[in-house]
Structures are given as structure tokens and as C-alpha cells.
Amino acid sequence: MIIVRLRRLPAADPARTDAREAGSGRAARRLPEKKKGTDVSANFEKLVKIVEETRADMEKAEAGNKSAAVRVRKSMQDIKQVAQDIRKDMMNVKKAESQP
């Protein structure tokens, strides 16, 4: 019979600390807070950047390059995700403006 002794892990820190350092005796490092859905212009710039980077692959794909076509399809998925993030951001802006 094999007996396994498990070590109890420290409880999750609501202040978002790095769990690897929390149990090591060193001061826990505070992770930066993510601002998901709050920076519309940054997401828009990201969208423009992806579109500009995809232009060369688009031309290659139209010429028959299959690898470039794969990269274009991946870029289109990225564009779709960023566009969805922008849409969510705009809804949050609209909700924030309508609340007193």
C-alpha cells in the first residue's frame, strides 16, 4: 500500500499575489490589475495594427500562397476577437454614461 502525504497549499489571496512566491517565505509580489474592456482606443489601435500586418499575407494568399492563406485566416480570427472586445468596451461606455 502506498501512502501519499499532501502538503496544504496557502489560501488564495484576494489581493492577487503570485502564489509561487506566497508560500516561499518571501514577500508576495502584487500582480498588476487587468483593465479588461476599459481601453477602447488601445483595442482600436491593436485592430488597425493587425489589419496592416495582414495586408502582405493577403496579397500573397491571393497569388496562391497556401501558407499565407493560413496566416490570413488566423489574423481574421484575431480581428474578430479584437472587434468583439471593442464592441464590449463601447457597451460599457454606453452603460457608464447612462448611469447617474
Image (spheres, grey):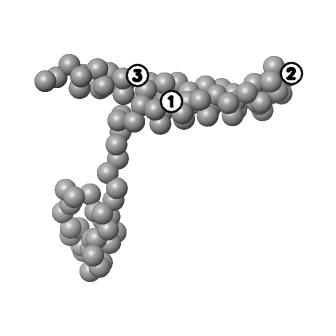
Q: Nearer the viewer, residue 70 or 53?
A: 53
Question: Mark 1 vs mark 3: which is more N-terminal?
Answer: 1
Residue 14, placed above or below residue 21:
above
Q: CA distance from mark 2 to mark 1?
A: 29 Å
Question: Mark 2 vs mark 3: which is more N-terminal?
Answer: 2
Evaluate whether residue 6 shows in this view.
no
Q: Which residue, given by chain and number where applicable, does mark 2 sit on?
A: 63
Say which amino acid is labelled 2. Ala
Q: Which residue, given by chain and number where applicable, does mark 1 sit on?
A: 44
Label 1 SS: helix
What crowding class fits label 1: few (fewer than 14 Cα within 10 Å), some (14-19), or many (20 or more)? some
| Residue 92, quarter of picture | top left
Q: Say which of marks 1 and 3 sits in front.
A: 1
Residue farthest toward the bottom in the current orientation of the protein:
25
Residue 74, placed above or below residue 7:
above
Q: CA distance from mark 1 to mark 3?
A: 10 Å
| Residue 65, quarter of picture | top right
Say which amino acid is labelled 3. Arg
Q: Position of residue 70 (x, y in %)?
A: 71, 30
Q: Nearer the viewer, residue 47 or 7?
A: 47
Q: What residue do we see at 32% from left, 51% from top?
A: 33
Say which amino acid is labelled 1. Phe
Q: Which residue, given by chain and number where applicable, does mark 3 sit on?
A: 87
Q: Quadrant of the N terminus?
A: bottom left
What crowding class fits label 2: few (fewer than 14 Cα within 10 Å), some (14-19), or many (20 or more)? few
Label 2 SS: loop
Q: Position of residue 60 (x, y in %)?
A: 82, 27
